């Protein structure tokens, strides 16, 4: 089978810079294994940009599983922070997927960037958000419908770059022909809900879908940087 993908990133309508990084930066089609990743940096005006770009550069250059790649990204950000005191405290989410042409999907993940699987017009979130509110929902302290308005909705419980002792999620799925994988920063998922993502992503090419999702997030307010990667598994 063949993998066809597209990626895009946008500053949004409120932020003065873009702290997200995506890999690859261009669209394409391959019949070999593909790595795609989204990172959403945090820190000072420049530090977030540096964290996300340093993390993904190290992750994609590393041989190993997606979890090992995310660990390498974490180590690179920690090391950079130690070298430059002005960057201390910077961090980033990383959601990195490796997809094989036979449909085997492995994801390494830390933070609240997300991976979704779209199959037969149904969408499922594959990753778990590492946020305070996600823990509250899991423990029954709040209801899922209360997350969007909760004052701690964007507070991370894990991020790459803050500590070398970082727990990293790695999960495996099996894609089938016709499936669509979506990776995104929270600049998308915080602006439009999963059903809107499903409706927009159910039609069109990977390239058209990336920019339709980004446009929808901007139309909803564009409060954050928005980054999207879409991968289709074709027969």
Image (cartoon, rainbow, N blue to C red):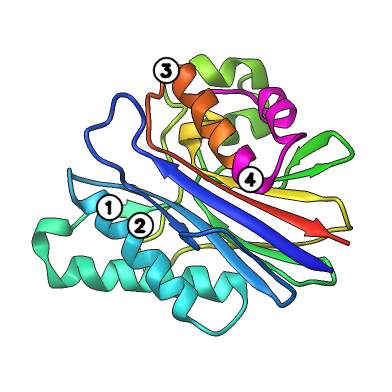
For numbered disc 3, what is the local secondary structure? loop
* Residue 134 image offset from top left, x and y in percent: 58, 34
Q: Could you tell me if the residues under marks 3 and 4 are in contact, i.e. CB atoms within 8 Å?
A: no
The residue under the point 84% across, 58% down is: 175
Earlier sequence position, callout 3 versus callout 4:
4
Identify the residue under disc 4.
128
Provide the major secondary structure of the magenta segment: helix
Confirm whether residue 127 shows in the render: no
The residue carrying mark 3 is 221
What's drawn in magenta, residue-wise? 191-208
Is the residue under label 3 in contact with that under label 1 (CB below 8 Å)? Answer: no
Residue at 30 percent across and 58 percent down: it is 51
212 sits left or right of 224 in the view: right
> Which quarter of the rendering shows the N terminus?
bottom right
Measured from the top left, where is residue 36 in percent x and y? Answer: 57, 62
Helix, strand or loop at mark 4? loop
- Mark 1 sits on what residue? 49
Identified at 76% across, 48% down, the residue is: 180
Q: Is residue 104 magenta?
A: no
Q: Are marks 1 and 2 in contact (CB under 8 Å)?
A: yes
Q: Nearer the viewer, mark 1 or mark 4?
A: 1
Task: Give the labeled residue for mark 2.
Answer: 52
- Cα separation, mark 4 vs mark 2, equals 19 Å
Tag in front: 3 or 2 = 3
> Could you tell me how far apart the alpha carbons at marks 3 and 2 are, in whole angstroms?
23 Å
Q: Quadrant of the C terminus?
A: bottom right
Circle 2: element type: helix
Whole-angstrom CA distance, mark 3 to mark 4, is: 25 Å
Query: Does residue 69 lie above or below 177 as drawn?
Result: below
Q: Nearer the viewer, residue 65 or 10?
A: 10
> Residue 56 location in percent, x, y?
42, 65
């Amino acid at each position: 089978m063949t993998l066809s993908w597209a990626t895009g990133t946008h500053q949004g309508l409120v932020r003065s810079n873009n702290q997200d990084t995506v890999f690859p930066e261009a669209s394409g089609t391959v019949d070999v294994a593909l790595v795609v990743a989204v990172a959403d940096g945090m820190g000072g005006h420049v530090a977030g940009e540096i964290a996300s770009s340093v993390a993904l550069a190290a992750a994609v250059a590393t041989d190993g599983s997606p979890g090992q790649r995310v660990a390498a990204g974490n180590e690179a950000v920690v090391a950079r922070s130690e070298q430059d005191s002005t960057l201390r405290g910077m961090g980033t989410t990383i959601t990195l997927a490796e997809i094989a042409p036979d449909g085997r999907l492995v994801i390494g993940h830390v933070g609240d960037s997300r991976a979704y699987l779209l199959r037969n017009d149904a969408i499922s979130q594959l990753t778990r958000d590492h946020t305070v509110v996600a823990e509250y929902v899991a423990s029954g302290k709040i209801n899922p419908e209360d997350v969007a308005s909760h004052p701690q909705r964007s507070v991370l419980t894990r991020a790459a770059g803050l500590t070398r002792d970082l727990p990293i999620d790695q999960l495996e799925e099996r894609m089938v022909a016709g499936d669509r994988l979506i990776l995104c920063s929270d600049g998308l998922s915080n602006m439009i809900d999963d059903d809107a993502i499903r409706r927009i992503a159910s039609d069109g090419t990977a390239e058209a879908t990336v920019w339709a999702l980004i446009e929808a997030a901007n139309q909803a307010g564009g409060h954050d940087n928005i980054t999207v990667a879409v991968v289709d598994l074709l027969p």
